[in-house]
Image (spheres, coloured by chain):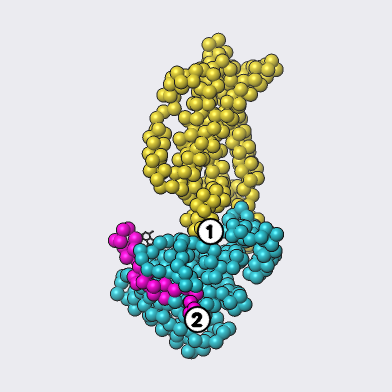
Amino acid sequence: MKSQTLGKASAPRRRKSLLSMGAEFPTTTYVGIAICAFLLLLAAWTIVARLGLVQPIFLPSPLAVVAKLIKLAQDGTLGSDVAISVYRISIGFLIASVMALATAILIGAYRFWEAAIEPILDFVRYMPVVAFVPLSILWSGTSDPQKFLIIWIGTYFQQALMFKDNIKRVPADFVGFGRTLGMSDLRVLMRIVVPSAMPQIWDTLRISLGWAWTWVTLAELVAANSGLGYRITVAQRYLQTDMAIGYILVLGVLGLATDQIMRFLGRQFFKYEKRS
Amino acid sequence: MAQHPKLSISGLNKSFRNGQVKVLSDINLEVADNEFVSLVGASGCGKSTLLAIIAGLQESDNGEVLVDGAPISGPGIDRGVVFQSYTLLPWLTAQQNVEFALRETRHDPKEIADIARRHIELVKLTRFADAFPSQLSGGMKQRVAIARALSYRPKILLMDEPFGALDALTRGQMQELLMQIWQEHKLTVIFVTHDVSEAVYLSDRIFVMGLNPGRIKETIPVPFARPRASEEGRDPELLELQARVLRSIREETAGHDVH
Ligand SMILES: Nc1ncnc2c1ncn2[C@@H]1O[C@H](COP(=O)(O)OP(=O)(O)O)[C@@H](O)[C@H]1O
Ligand SMILES: [Mg+2]
């Protein structure tokens, strides 16, 4: 009897702990909180716009933004803008990633190349990407290669250093194991070290892909006649604030979606990491 | 031609940082075919370094390491290693991990699956052949590592505290299994441990290593019949020997500040 009342008494205490540090609750509760926060933000935006606190030319209502996006989707503008930006980020990111991985393997495994290359990477990494924009236009005009170049500058240097870190974290005994089988250094590297680091490398790819969205947008903002970034500059020129905000939201959704896709693929590829 | 010992080390020295830190000093030892020897000694006395040199994974400053009378040049498949840390490839199943070693050591592709299966059976893991390392306990992982190291038939098996990370119960089971395999397959084993009772249970001879610099301080034969009782039920003579090994190690650390 007594223990039953005790059990009941502990229930309200658990509810109170929703706001306490390190509190645990079911995923449904988590999602619920997230949706509520989103709706709250949307409601605040709607109220500000509706009450006319800010002129529509500066802040159109959410409904106006959505309506504009639907219109742009119907006439094909949105689709072609997304397609061209996705194309640019794909190529630029692919080139940067392949080059960064090759560099990382080289400097992660060979002290000589580490000494020769890493200080340069470290130095360039601290140069602001935006400062390269004028140069990139000078070197490669305003067509697609300039977009690839900006994406490359923005991601390659960071990726190479992060990949190197991923590779260095593979325990030395893995290398020792490969050597006791009589494997050559190159073979140990390609058959043991790099595959061992793959889950971490994938994570680095996912994170750097997020940054690449920023760089493609930047490149399109300054010099382009197509793409999501370009359309935002057009919106500014013609005071189409609804379009600018709509496109920023689209960029946010695209970034979030690619991140989720990368996470999903990672879970599929690296199933072996899960204990079950 | 005279019969060579399986392994022979003479006049071996090793230091780190351009000779500033002397780790191994004038190591001389021989291990016979089918012999099981242990290296024991205080932590930091150079057991792992010596084993890595025998494996060919580290270079000594001077001295000779001979396997069947021939000097070693780097690592080779005549010496198999079981590391203390888990070195199973995480994206391969237990079976595939053994197959990996067989493929890299250029076994006949038609036989690889079968040899691997038999070695998984040898370490009593047939039920877990298709499990990934993340799904195996520490003891199971080390069993796969043993199966993998044995699969390509090295002449010498080198083991660096392979059971060091396991709980006492699992460690006991692993020792028993290793003994069975050693007796059935007539292996030559060099086993590094800091667990004296483990060394006494497993070895034909125990090399006690001294500290600062690391050297072979004493060679203690373990002349007891097998199978030996593990832990409980050991007769007084065996316990006496165990105490002697322990004393020998303690003498080394007594002068030093060891917590
Ligand atoms: N790469 C290295 N550089 C410098 N000192 C090292 C290196 N590897 C090992 N040592 C030193 O050599 C000594 C012996 O190490 P180790 O062989 O790991 O001892 P044990 O396995 O007996 O505990 C230790 O004092 C350790 O600090
Ligand atoms: Mg050690």
Mark 1 CB within 8 Å of ligand 1? no
- Tell me, by letter, which chain the rendering colours cyan: B
Q: Which residue is mark 2?
A: B204
Label 1 or label 2, whichever lies nearer to me, is: 1
Residue under the point 53% across and 14% down: A236
Q: Within the magenta stretch, is there residue A234?
A: no
**Tag 1: amino acid:** Gly
Residue A196: image location, x then y, percent: 55, 50
Q: In the image shown, does B209 or A116 lie closer to the viewer? A: A116
Residue placed most toward the observer, A213 or A12: A213
At label 2, which amino acid type do we have?
Asp
**Chain letter behind tag 1:** A
Q: CA distance from mark 1 to mark 2?
A: 29 Å
Instruction: Give x and y (percent) for residue B43.
Output: 40, 69
Q: Which region is colored magenta?
A: B1-29
Residue displayed at 43% across by 65% down: B53
Crowd rating for badge 2 (residues with CA inside 10 Å; few <14, some 14–19, many 20+): some
Against B210, is A178 above or below? above
**Number of numbered discs overlaid on the protein picture:** 2
Disc 1: CA contacts within 10 A as few (<14), some (14-19) or many (>=20): many
Query: Where is residue B107, by image quadrant?
Result: bottom right
* Colour yellow, chain: A
> In this rendering, would A233 be left or right of B125?
left
Q: Residue at x 59, y 68 (%)?
A: B153
Disc 2, SS: loop
Q: Main secondary structure of the magenta part?
A: strand
Mark 1 lies on residue: A182
